[in-house]
Image: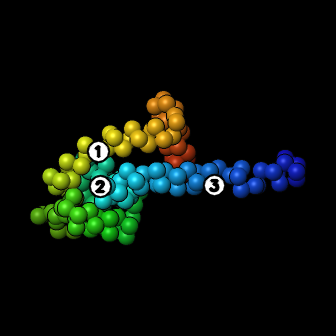
Amino acid sequence: MDDADLEKEIKLERQLCFALYGAAHAFNRAYKPLLEPLGLTYPQYLVMMALWEEDGQQVKALGEKLGLDSGTLSPLLKRLEQAGYVERRRDTVDERQVFITLTDPGRAMQCHAAKIMRSIGEQTGCTMGELGTLRDRLKQLKEKLSPKE
């Protein structure tokens, strides 16, 4: 690659990281008006989705699933508990283990998920197949960029 080509490639608008950054912000803006009536932020919505999939998870497992450390996850869970959507309880055998379970209002909120997903899908202008392909490619990219243990 010569200097002219290199100079063209190092422009901000040519960077994959900048495109992903912008897309992530656009998604957050698109979700905001859909989640506000539910009293949820986007990260709180992700926690709720993980719990709708599998209720009664350990905080540690929930953090691993969402890619969130305890310093980020704990305040989210505290706010969801204050809103009445989840309950935290310590394991009776090992008090270091904390489990998160949905309350009835938290479970009832799941009925909104399909409408939210449909609205976001429509806003993208993509078909379900295109969205699935994009999601899978992004998951592959994340895997390749993740540190190997």
Q: Horizontal placement of 129 versus 43: left or right? A: right
Please report contact status of discs 1 and 2: CB closer than 8 Å, yes or no: yes
Q: Position of residue 110 (x, y in %)?
A: 25, 46
Q: Secondary structure at mark 3?
A: helix
For residue 18, the mark is: 3
The front one of 125 and 15 is 125
Instruction: Identify which residue is drawn at 88% across, 51% down.
Output: 4
Please report contact status of discs 1 and 3: CB closer than 8 Å, yes or no: no
Q: Secondary structure at mark 1?
A: helix
Point out the tag, 3 or 2, that comes first from the N-terminus. 3
Point out the tag, 1 or 2, that comes first from the N-terminus. 2
Q: Horizontal placement of 41 versus 100: left or right? A: right
Determine which residue is flagged by label 2: 38
Q: Position of residue 12 (x, y in %)?
A: 71, 56
What's the amino acid at mark 3? Phe
Q: Within 10 angstroms of label 2, few (less than 14), some, or many (20 or more) residues?
A: few
Instruction: Identify which residue is drawn at 52% across, 34% down.
Output: 126
Front label number (3 vs 2): 2
Residue 51 vertical position relative to residue 136 in the rendered view, above or below: below
The answer to whether any part of residue 115 appears in the image is: yes
**Quarter residue 32 falls in:** bottom left
Q: Position of residue 30 (x, y in %)?
A: 46, 50
Determine which residue is flagged by label 1: 112
Q: Secondary structure at mark 2?
A: helix
Point out the tag, 1 or 3, that comes first from the N-terminus. 3
As drawn, the residue found furthest toward the left would be: 92
The front one of 27 and 95 is 27
Q: Within 10 angstroms of label 3, few (less than 14), some, or many (20 or more) residues?
A: few
Q: Within 10 angstroms of label 1, few (less than 14), some, or many (20 or more) residues?
A: few
Q: CA distance from mark 1 to mark 3?
A: 31 Å
